Image (cartoon, coloured by chain):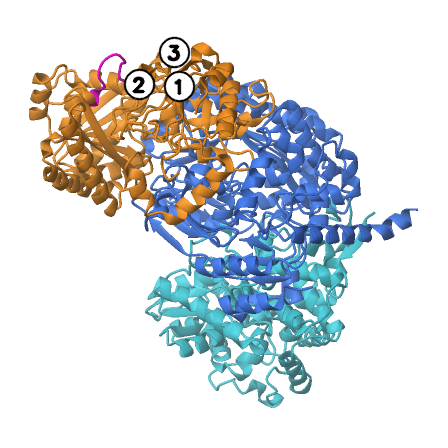
Chain colours: A cyan, B orange, C blue
Amino acid sequence: MPTKVNLETIDLNNYRYDMSRCIKCKGCYWVEHTYMPGMKFASRCPSNVWNDFDSYGAFGKMRIGTALVEGKLSWTPTLLEVVYADPLCGACDVGCKRNLDLEIELSLEAMRVKAVQDGAGPMPAHKKIAENIARTHNLFGAPHGSRRKWVSKDIQVAEKADVLYFVGCTASYTNNEIAQATGRILNASRTPFMLMPDEWCCGNTLQSVGMLDEARHLAKRNIEMVKAAGAKTVLLSCAEGYRMWKVEYPKLLNIATADLPFEVVHLAEFADAALKNGSLRPTKPVNARLTYHDSCSISRLADPWTPWSGERGWMGTVSPKLKRRRGTQGLYAQPRNVIKAIPGVEFIEMIRTRENAFCCGAGRGTKEAFPTLASSSAKHRLEEVKEIGAEVLVSACPWCKNNFAQAVQEDGHGVKVMDFSELIAASLGA
Amino acid sequence: MISKDELAKIVGKENVSDAPADLLNYSGDHSLVPPGMPECVVWPKDSEKVSELLKWSNKNNVPVVPVSSKEHFNGGAVPRQGGIVMDLSRMNKILEIDEDIKKTRLEAGVTWGQLTSELAQKGLRVPMPLLPHADRSVLSDFLDREVPTNTVYDYGEPMQAFEVVWPTGDVFRLGSASVNGYPDSGSHGGNPSGPGIDFYRFVQGAQGTMGVVTWTNLKVMFATKKDKVFFVPVDDLAYAQEFLYRLLPRRVGQEVLLLNRTDLAAIVAENFPADFERLRATLPPWTLIIVVSGLSRRPDEKIAYEVKLLREIVRNEFRKLVPDEALPGFPGLGGKILSLLRNPWPAGVPYWKNRWQGGSQSLFFIARPEKSQKFVEIVESVAPKHGYPVADIGSYIQPIEHNRACQVEFTFFYDEKNPAAKSRIAALYKDAARALLNEGALFTRPYGDLAPMVYERAANYVMALRRVKKIFDPNNIMNPGNLCF
Amino acid sequence: MAIVKEAYKALEAIVGAKYLSDDPVICEGYRSGPAGYEAGTGYERVMTKIPGAVIMPRTTEEVQKIVKICNRYTVPYVPYSTGFYGPRSHPHIENALLVDLKRMNDFEFDEKHWYAIVGSGVIYSQFQEECLKRGGYVVIGGGGAQASVIANLIGDGWSPLSHRIGLPHRRILGTEMVLPDGEIVKMGSLAVGDDWFWGDGIGPDLRGLLRGYTGLRGCLGIVTRMAVKVLPFQPERLVPTGIAPNTALALPEKRVKWINYIMPSKAAQVKAMYEIGKAEIGGAVTKVPLFWRAIAKAECKEEFWDLWLKETPETVANFHIVRVLLIGFTSEEQLTYDENVLSDIMMELGGQARPTKPSDESWIKNADSAGMWLMCGSYVSVDYVIETMRQATEHGEVYAELKKKYTPPLMPDHGDPGWFQSFELGYQGYSEFLIYWDQDEDTTGVDHFYLETSKMNIDHRFYTALIGPHQPMYLTGPKYGPNYHEWMLRIKNEFDPSWVCHPPVPFAHDEFVERAPWMHELKTWKTPQDFPYPAWLKTQMAAEAKAFRATLEPAAKAKK
C-alpha cells in the first residue's frame, strides 16, 4: 500500500523509511573510501569524533530516530544531546548518498523539529539566541542600531543596486573585517552594491535547531525586503547565511531555489566570475603557505532546493522521481580558482577536502550549546593544517574563522586564520 | 599389554607384527631423537581400519604413532612411550588427478617418487620443498609445513580439504570435503577451511599428535614450458638478502634459493670425497639460484620481462652481484640444478645430506631474512666449541613469499654410526638452537629436543594447545611425549 | 534487570565513566536493525536485542579485565568492531554488555617484511591506503571498505582480488586474542616473543580457534590485535578523482588496468576463467551479475528499477561478462605480457573486449557493498562459498532455481545465478548468491528461503559458507564432517564454560527456529530436548522465548 510522503521536516514520519533503512555502513562517519587518507584524518563526523559511542554518529541517530518516531523513546538530556551536539554539516548525508538514496540530513533536522514540537528542545543556549533575535534581530542581543557600524568611510555603498550585500550578524558585530573586506572587493571590482534597508538576522540558528515557525517568519520578511529593494542578486560572505538564503528559505516556504525572485551568490562565486571577466585583479603578492577549509554550508549543503511530495510504494520506490541533493553543486572549484590566482600564495590542499572536509564544529548553533564539541573539532582540524605544513588557514565563513582562531589561541598552533574575503582584499591592496 | 590377536582381528593377521626386526625399523631414524621401541606395528588399509584401531587404542590406553613415510629425518615418528606404530604405507593410492581444477587427491602413503612421476606424465607438478626423499609421504611433508622452493605465489599451503581420523577414532572430513557423500558430491575438496571452525590448523605441524590424516587434496601446477637458471655467486650474505628484498616482491623467479658451498657441493657432487671436496674448494661461499620460467603461453615473453627487471636491478642497485646462466667453473650446472629442483631425491641411494659422512642433523627455523647473516655468525661461533669445523656447516636459506620471511637451515654432517660423533653433534645442535632462539629464530617445527626449549617460552600457547588437545585426544594416546604433550 | 551493579562499577573502574554507558538512548543507538546486512529478517527481529550497556576499551589489558569481570558476574558480552555484519554481530540476549572495540585502532607497518599490525578498530580503507602508500595492497573483503580488518579476516575476507591473493586464512600472522574465560593467547611468532611477523603455530596451529568456514561470529573470544600480510603491488600512484557519488581511483594504465569482455556463452565465460588461472595472469577475474551494472548506473532505486525491469530472463541468461584486472607487479612489460596472453585466450574463446574506464570504482579501495541495499532496502548473501571452480559455476544455478519459489518477497532478478569467479589462480572458485527484499513486506519467505538453501546444499552435497552459527547447527552438523557441531560444542565448552561470550551463539539460529512459529514447518531435523547451555543461560533463553511468544499473542488473537 503506497504511503504519502514529502520532504517537509515538520513531520518526522516523512523520514521513517530513511531512518529505518540505515545499514550501519558508516559511510556517514568515514571519509569517502576512495579518498581515505589512511590511519590519520579518517573521519568527517565531528559529533562522533567528539563522542565515540555509535549513538553520536548518524548511523546511531537513525536508530534513535526510528525509536523516536515509533514512540519508544522519551526526551531525556542524553537524547537532547545526541540530537543537538551536531553541527549538521552534511557529511553524513553526502556520505550515505555515495551508495544509497536516504535523506540523512533532513532526518536529523526533523528530529530537532520534533524536539521543539514536543517542548523538549532546543538547548537553553539556543533559546537565548532566539530571544536575542526576537528582541534585537541579531544573535548577540547587541543593539540593532549598531548593525551598520562596520561601514567605514572608504567603502561605497549604493542606495540602490542590482547586488544586495547581506552582511549577516557576525560580520556586522563581531567580525567587521569580513564585511569591510567584502565591501572593498565589491568596490574594487566596480560592482555597486546596496545593503538591506533594515537587515535582520537570516535565522540560521533558528532553522538549524528546529524553530521553523520563527525561522519562516524571518525568511518571509527578509525575502519581501529584498524584493522591495529591487535587488537581483543577494551576495553573502558568510557560508551559513548563503545556505539559509539559497536552500533554507525556499525549503521553509515550500518553493524551489529557482523560484526565489533573486539569485543567491556567495563571495567565492562572485570573485571567481570577477576574476574571469577581468573586473577583479589581485596583484599584490600574499606570500604564504596557505590552505583552504571547505565550509559546509557552501559545499555539501549548498545544492539548490526543490520541494517534493509524492508516494512511496513498491520496494520503497518513490514517485514522482526525486533527484536527490548530494552536495555535488557545492562551491568547490570557485574558491580554489581565486586562491590560485593570488600571487605569492603557495596553495596546499588539506588532506580532507571538498565533500570530505571535516567541519569546524561551530555552525548552526553548535558552538553556543556545545563549546567543547566546537573547540575539539577545530583543534582536530588544525592538526591537519599542521600535518600539511600550512601557515595560513582560509575559510569562507565567519563561524569557521572565529572557531579556528579561538582554537589557535588556546593551543598555540601559530597558524594564521583568515577569511576568504580578507585574503582577496589583501591582494587587491585594499 | 598389547593383544596382537585383537589387533589382528581389526587389520588381519598379516598386517600386524611384533617381530623384532620390524619393531627396530620404527624405533629410530636419521635424527638425534633417542630410539624408542614400539610394541607392535600395524598396517591398516583404509580409514575405517584406522578408526577401529584408534578406538581400540583408546579403550586399552595404548599410545599410537602414525607413520606414512619410509624415510624419516626429524624424529617426529619415533615412539616415546611404546605403544603401536600405525604404518599407513598400504594406503598409497593416488585417488584423483584433476587438471581442470588443478588438484590431486592422494592417500597418506603416496610418496614423492610416486606422485611426481604420475604427475609428470600429465604435464603437471607440485610445489616442492628442496629435494624431498622419494620415499617420503607427500602428505606428511606438507602437513609438517615443509617450505617449498617456489617463492612466487601469493598463497601458501598447497593442502586443501582432507580427511582425518581423530584420536577418538572418529572419521572426519574437513574443509569442503566435509560434505556428505564426498567425493560423490557437488563439492570437490578445494577449500581446507571449516566446517564451522578451522580444524585443519590443529593438525598442521602436529607431528602426529592430533590425529591420523588419511588422504588430502593437494594443489598441482602445470609444468613450465621453458626455464632459465641463473646463478649468482655471493660473498656477502647480507648484501644478497638486500637484493632479494628488492627483487622478490616484484615477482621474479619460480624457485629461488641460497645454498652455501658445502650444501651445494653435497647436492651436486658426483662422487665422494673427490668431487665433493673439489666443489667445496671452488664454489663461491654462497650461490643464489634463481629459476626464471615461462609458462604454457608466450613463455619467452615471460622470461624476457623477468630477466629484464632482474638485470636492471642488478645493474642499477646491486653491482656486486653477477647473475649468469652458468656458474663459472661448473658447466652444465643449470640443467642439473633444474632437474634436482623438480624431482625428489631418488630412493635406494643415500639421501644427499647423508652421502658425505653417513649422517646429518639439520636445524631449521623461520626468520626475518635480514637476520640470516647474524644467524650464520651465531652458528659459526658455536660450532668450533664442539669441535665442528665451520667449513663443514651446510647452510640453506629459502626465501618465502616475496622474501617476507625465510627458512634458514643449518646442517651438521657426521657419521651417525659413531656414538661419540652423534653425542657431539647432539650437544652442538642444542647449543646452537638455544643461541639462535635467543636471537629470535622461530622454530615453528620443534622436533625432538627443540620442543621443550621452545615451548618453555610459550607458556600461554602451551596451555591453550593442551586444552585443544584434550578435546580431540582425551586419553593422550596420539604420539604422546612429543611436542608439549 | 540491568547489568548487575557490582559488575558495572568494576567495569567503570577499568575504562572510566566516559567510555561506559547504560543510558537507554546510547544503547538504542547500538540496535542492530531495522536495516543493514541480514536485517529485516525474522532472525533479526526475534534474536537481536539492544545492549544493556556499552563499553569501549582501548587496550588488550582492558579487554581482558572486562572479560574476567563478565565471567565473575555472569554478564553476557558481545565483541563488536563496526556492527556492519548485522544481527549476528549484536547482542542476542537481554542486558548484554556490548564491547565496542573501535578505540583499539593502533597501527604499525613493517614495509620490509610486508605486514602491518592492526587493532580491531582499524577498517579496510584506512589499511589499504597505508598499504598503497608503501607499494602494497590487500584484499578488501566484499563486505566493504568500512569493515574492520580483523573482524573480516576472522570471518570472511575475499573479493575479486582473491584471484591472486587467495584464502584470507593465510594472511593472518601473529595474533593476540582474549579467550572467553579471560586468558590471553598469542599465536604465531608472538607466542614465543615480541615479533608479529609470522603466523604458523609452534607445532599445531591455534589459529584454528580464530575462524573457520565461516567463523565463530564472536562466540569464542575477542581478537584484539593482529598482524596481517600485505602483498606487493606496483609503484605507481592510484589517484582518487571525482566527487561523490561518482568517485573512482584513476589507474596508471601501464601498470593497472581493468578490461571487460563479453563472452559468447556461459561455457566460454567459465573456460576463460580456467585459462586465465592456468596462465597465471591477472590480479582479479570475475563475472558480474547484470543487475550490478544497473546498480552502478543508477543514482537512486527508481533509476535502478527503470533499468532492471527492461531486462528479461533471456537477456540475463545471455549476459556473460568477464572482468579482468591486470596488475603490472613486475613492470610495464609484465602488464603487456598479461594483456597479450589474455588477448590470446579471448581470441580462442570469442571474447570481445569492451571499452573499459581507466579507473577503479570499487574493488581496490572501496568494495562498494553499500550499493547492495539500493534496490529494495534489505539484502543478505545466502552463500559466499569458496570451493573449486566446478562447484562455483554450478552452484548459483541451483540457488536461482530454488529462489523462484520465493519470489516474491525476494526481488525479481530474472533468474540471475549470482556472482562467481576464479580464486587463487583457479585452484579455487567462488560463488555468491545475493537476495534482496523490502522488509515492509511479509518476510516469511525470506526466512524460509534462507533455511531451505541449507537443506538444498546438503541435498546437492555442496559446500557452503552458511554453516556453523549461520544456520541451525543441529541441521548442518550431522551432514558435514560428519558431526562437526559436536566438536565445535566441545571447543566452546572448553574455552567458554560459562557461555558468557555472545550467547547463545553458535546455537542462535537453532534458537530462532524454535521460537519463530513460522519456521516450525521447516524443521525436519532432530534437536535435543534442551540445548546444551549452562543453567543460567537455559533459564534466560526460556524466559526470552516466552517473552517473544507473548508478543505474538495479540497478532494471533487479532487473526482469530
Quadrant of residue B478 within the rendered picture: top left
Name which quarter of the figure residue A149 lies in: bottom right
Front position in the image: C514 or C302: C514
- Disc 1/disc 2 C-alpha distance (Å): 10 Å
Q: Is residue A203 magenta?
A: no
Cα distance, mark 3 to mark 2?
A: 28 Å
Q: Residues within 10 Å of mark 2 (few under 14, many from 20)?
A: few
**Residue C235 location, x and y as percent?**
33, 42
For the question of whether residue A233 can be seen, the reply is yes
In this rendered view, identify the residue nearer to me: C441 or B116: B116
Q: Amino acid at mark 2?
A: Asn
Mark toward the start of the polypeptide (3 vs 2)? 2
Do the residues indicated by labels 1 and 2 lie within the same chain of the protein? yes
The image position of residue A292, as x and y in percent, is 44, 65
**Image height of A117 relative to B301, above or below:** below
Q: Quadrant of the C terminus of chain B?
A: top left
Q: Which residue is mark 1?
A: B41
Q: Which residue is mark 3?
A: B118
| Magenta residues (range) | B342-353
Kindly check if marks 1 and 2 are in contact, taking CB atoms under 8 A apart as contact. Answer: yes
Q: Which residue is mark 2?
A: B25
Disc 3 residue type (three-letter) = Glu
Residue C441: give x, y in percent of width and height: 78, 44
Place of residue B19 in the rendered image (x, y in percent of width and height, measured from the top left): 35, 14
